[in-house]
Image (tube, rainbow, N blue to C red):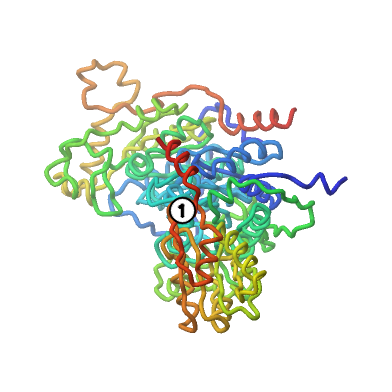
Amino acid sequence: MATQVATKSVPYKEKAPFDYTSYIRKGKLPHIWCPGCGHGIVMKSLLRAIHATGLPQDDIAMVSGIGCSSRTPGYLDFNTLHTLHGRAIAYATGVKLAKPKLKVIITTGDGDALAIGGNHFIHACRRNMDMVILVYNNYIYGMTSGQSSPTTPQGMIATTAKYGSIEPTFDTCNLAKAAGATFVARGTAYHCQELEKTLYEAIMHKGTAVVDILDSCPTYYGRFNKVKGNSELMVIAEKEGTVSQVQAEKMTPEQLQGKLVRGVLHKTERPEYCEEYEKLMAKAQGK
Amino acid sequence: MKKDKQKKFMQGNEACAEGALYAGCRFYAGYPITPSTEIMEIMAARLPKIGGAFIQMEDEIASVSAIVGAALGGMKSMTATSGPGFSLMQEGLGYACMTEIPCVVVDVMRSGPSTGYPTGPSQSDVMQAKWGTHGDRPAIVLTPSSVQEVLYETIRAFNLSEIYRTPVTILYDEVIGHMREAIVIPELGEVEVVERQKPSCPPSEYKPYEVKNGKVAPLAAYGEGYRFHVTGLYHAPDGFPSGNTKLIQESNERLVQKVEKNKEKIWKNEELYLDDAEIGVFAYGVSAKSAKFAVKELRSKGIKVGLLRPLTIWPFPDDAVEEMAKKVKTIIVPEMNLGQIANEVQRASKGQCEVKGIFRVDTDPIHPKQIMNAILGKPVEATIIPTEIMIERDMQDG
C-alpha cells in the first residue's frame, strides 16, 4: 500500500490564478440545482480550497450518496463515485483503504449522511480514517421534493411534516464530535470565503473531518416555511442565525440562544486508521 | 514430500478463504454472521501478512459498499455473509452490477426467513441470489458441494467477475461451510487466475463503459491518471448519467446479455450415468452430496438412475436440463427449500418428463435414503434421523 499524502498543518494561502475550467468537466454544466440553491456556491468554495491545497486532481477521490448535494462529483474532474443513498462513506472507506494515497472527499446531505447513512457516519468518525465529510445541510430532502430530515428544525413544515415537525434535530457537529471525529467545523454558503478557508483546513487535516455546511433550499424548505422561495431571505437567515467563533466568545449564553457557531469547533489528533493499518501489517509480517 | 505439504484437512469456509487468496483477493470487508464468520476471521489474519487490507464494517450494507470502493481502488475484493446479511447486501449487489465493478460475495446459507435457525443449513437463497436486487440484472452464482470445490469455485468466481466485470456470488450452506475434508491446495500457476485488464488508451480517450466487440472496456483504478465517473444511474459509455430512453433500454439489455450470451462458458455441470438413465436427479450444493451417494448406491443395484449436478446455478443450466428431460421419465430435485429450483427444472424440462421435488427445510440435510426412496417410487419419509440425536439437539437449543 502506498504512503499517505502529507497533510500537515499549513496556513491557508490563496493560490492565484484560479481557473475553474481545470476542475469542472467539460460539457457537464449546467448543474441540476434550482435557482437560489446554495450548492453551487459551496462547490465553488470547495474547488478554491482544493486548489489552495495544491493536491493533484488524480490524487483526489470524490464520493457521494444520493440527493442534490451528491450530484457534485459528476461535475468535477476528479476520481468520482456517485453511490447509493446513505452509503457514500462506506464506499469511500473501501476506496481509501485500497488506495491510501488518495484524498477522499465526500459530498453528502443531511438526509443522506444523518438519516439513512447515520450508522456509517458515526462509525467513520470513530475510526478516524482520513476523509473529509461535507454535509450540505439544507434541513430538508430536496431531491424528493421536500420531506423532513433529521435536521429539520422543530415546528417547521415539510411535505411529511404538514403540521410542523415534532422531531428533535441532530446537531451535525455535536454528533460528529461525540462519535470521535478529529476535525469538526461549521460553515454556511453565505459566508463563502470563510467556508473556503474552513474547507481548506478540513482537507489538510489528517483523520476524519466533518464540515456541517448550512445551505438553503428555497424551492422546498423556503416555500413551505413562508420564506416564499426567496433565496435572499434564506441567505439572510444563514447570516443572522449563525455567529463566528470570535463573535461567540463575546456573547452571553442568552445572546447565543438559537444561534449556531461557525468555524473550526473541534480539532484534535488521534491515530489515523490507514496509518494504524500500516503498523498492523508490519506487526503481522513480523517487521 | 512436496505433494503431502499441499494436502490439508480443512472446512469449507477455510477453503473459501484459501481460494480467494489464491485468486489474488487483497481486500475483505465484512460483518460477523453465522455460519460464514470463519472466512472473515481467516482473512483478518492472513491479509495483513501479504499486504492486503481487511476491515470489519458496521454492517453488511457497508461491507458490500466497501468492497466495491476497494475494487475501484484496484483491488480484487470480497465479502462473505449469510441469509440476513445477504438480504441487506442486495442493493449493493445491484449497484455492482449496474456499475460493472468486479467483486465476489459469498453467502453461506442458513435457515430462514428472518433469523431462522442460524446454525442449520439451508438452500433457500438460490432465488434471492438471482432476483434479490431490484431491476433486471446479470447473475452469476456458483454452487460448490465439497470443500475442495469451494476452493476451486472461489477462484473461478474471481475469474468470472474479472472477465465479465460483474459481481459473482458463491452459494453454499452451513454443512459445506463447516464440514472438514482433506483437500489439495494447488500450487501457484496450477489453476488459472484471471488478472484485471487495465486500459491502455490515453486517459483523455478512456470510456469506462464503452463496448467493443461485445465486451465492456477494462476497468481503470482510481488514482492512476484515469479520472472517470461511476454512478448507479443509467449512464453513457463515458460513465456520465443519461436519461436517453434508447440508451436505457440498450444498457439494461446489454447488462443481462453479457452473462446470457456467454452462459455456455459460465456453465459447469457434473453428469453421472445420464446416458442410459430412466430417472434423473438434479441436485446442487449439500443436497448433491446425498444425491450422488444415492445414485451410486442404486446404480450398483442395477437401477438406471443418473445425476445432473450444476456448479453454476445461475445462469440456469437450461440446456443440460432439457437434454436430461428428453431421456428420463422423471427428474427428482432434492433441495433444502420449498421448491425454488424445482420450478426452474420444471420450466427447463419443457414438459418432456415429470419433475418431483424433495423439499426439506427442517435444517437437517436431505438424507441419501430419502432420495433413494424417491427414485424407487417409495414414500419419502419426512426425517430420517435417529431419535436420540434429535433430543440432544433440542436440549442444546434450550
Image location of residue B384, percent across then percent down: 49, 54
Residue drawn where x is 84% and y is 49% of the image: B3
Q: Report whether residue B323 is seen.
A: yes
Badge 1: few (under 14), some or many (20 or more) residues near its Cα, within 10 Å? many
B375, above or below B394, in the image = below
Dot 1 corresponds to which residue? B92
Q: A223 or A181, which is in the foreground?
A: A181
- Picture quarter containing residue A186? top left
Image location of residue B317, percent across then percent down: 56, 73
Direction from residue B138 to residue B8 in the image, left or right: right
Q: Report whether residue B167 is seen.
A: no
Q: Chain of mark 1?
A: B
Image location of residue B339, percent across then percent down: 43, 65
Direction from residue B3 to residue A226 in the image, left or right: left
Quadrant containing the C terminus of chain B in the rendered view:
top left
Direction from residue A282 to residue A160 in the image, left or right: left
Q: Report helix, strand or loop for mark 1.
A: helix
Question: Type of residue at label 1?
Answer: Gly
